[in-house]
Image (tube, rainbow, N blue to C red):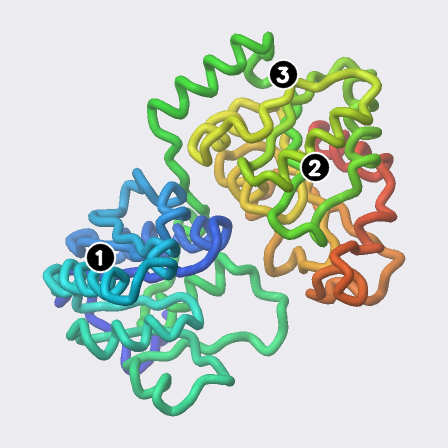
Amino acid sequence: MPAGPSDAIDLNSLSRALVVKLRHHGDVLLASPVLGALKRAAPRVEIDALVYAETAPMLEGHPALSGLFVIDREWRALPAPARAGREIALWRRLRARRHELLLHLTESPRGAWLARTLGCRYAVAPALRVRSAWWRASFTHLFVQPGNARRHMVEWNLDALRRIGVQPAPEDRNPVLAPGGAAEAEADRLLAQSGLARGRFIHLHPASRWAFKCWPAQRNAALVDALLARGEPVALTSGPDRAEREFTADIVARCAARPVDFSGRLSLKSLAALSARAKLFIGVDSAPMHIAAAMGTPVVALFGPSGEAQWGPWSARARVVASTAHACRPCGIDGCGGGKQSDCLAQLPEARVLVALDALLAA
């Protein structure tokens, strides 16, 4: 059996662990395997998580989770004394849990402060090249980042556990999202009202908070028309953000026939429940794409500037559609020249999406 690190941690000596992931929705979901893998390796350890408030639904109901703590970004708009009061109250609640292990999974400096002030015996974080000696000295273990963008974020997060001697089993690598009873009932109600049958419709979520990741409205509309012409019902969704709702409204206005439009009407949990009931999901690099993959729904994902090796759908039942004519991708730039529009996405034809869809359903 291969040897682990010489400074591996004896998990049997621990009672509580805190996993910190202060990023966006999809990032938090892709970190959920850390909870399951740690729980499998140390069943008696209570595992808590700290995330931003808006991303909490990604982890709520996770079977390995004991406690969920949140930071509300709206605290930043409060007067200094009120914001300090919120921060101190959160720190006291965390301190009261007496965590012995801290797994910090981002570059946020908050993780270093927590490592120094919570009294954890062990603290793990990425070995960031741009961080100072102060950062490095804040943690007992640093996990090494690859020198390229070829490692998927699921594995990147799990590297924090590998660094302390925990080797995740294959079954631990799958992101977990629990919609909950209320969301399941909401999805069933919406499908019944719209005349959609479970497993008989295509879920299309074309929007992203990042415009440079979006496929043009006219191409989405052409895809919807092609699917409807085939007899495939389409359910269209978007987040509640005004720009996302306007984008999906533009798509609907361009369609010759109307898809079922749930834009802006679903919570994240209800979106997950809806995806779980779909025949197939189509979307861009976004949290809903990761949600659909986590729910076990076949996924066709369109990629442009972001890299599918690092951010692609974590599922064997998935196909990525990306340009082969643009040698510059994935560039990681917010649109060509920083102009918020990406040629590598804009020039992807609908026919390639349909080919991927057919191949996935035939597999």
Residue wearing tag 3: 200
Q: Are marks 3 and 1 in contact (CB under 8 Å)?
A: no
Question: Percent position (x, y) of residue 214?
Answer: 72, 46
Residue drawn where x is 64% and y is 49% of the image: 285
Residue at far front of view: 79
Question: Where on the picture, by quarter, is residue 259?
Answer: top right
Type of the residue with mark 2: Phe
Three-letter amino acid code at the position of disc 1: Ala
The reply to whether callout 2 and callout 3 are in contact (CB within 8 Å) is: no
Mark number displayed over residue 247? 2
| Mark 2 or 3, nearer chain start | 3
**Residues at marks 2 and 1, CA–CA distance in whole angstroms:** 46 Å
Dot 2 falls on a residue whose secondary structure is helix
Q: Measure the C-alpha gap from mark 3 to mark 1.
A: 41 Å
| The image quarter in which residue 335 lies | bottom right
Q: Tell me the crowding category of disc 3: few under 14, some 14 to 19, or many 20 or more residues within 10 angstroms, Cα based.
A: some
| Residue 220: x %, y % from top left | 78, 34
Which residue position holds label 1? 42
Q: Of callouts 2 and 1, which one flags the residue occurring earlier in the amino acid sequence?
A: 1
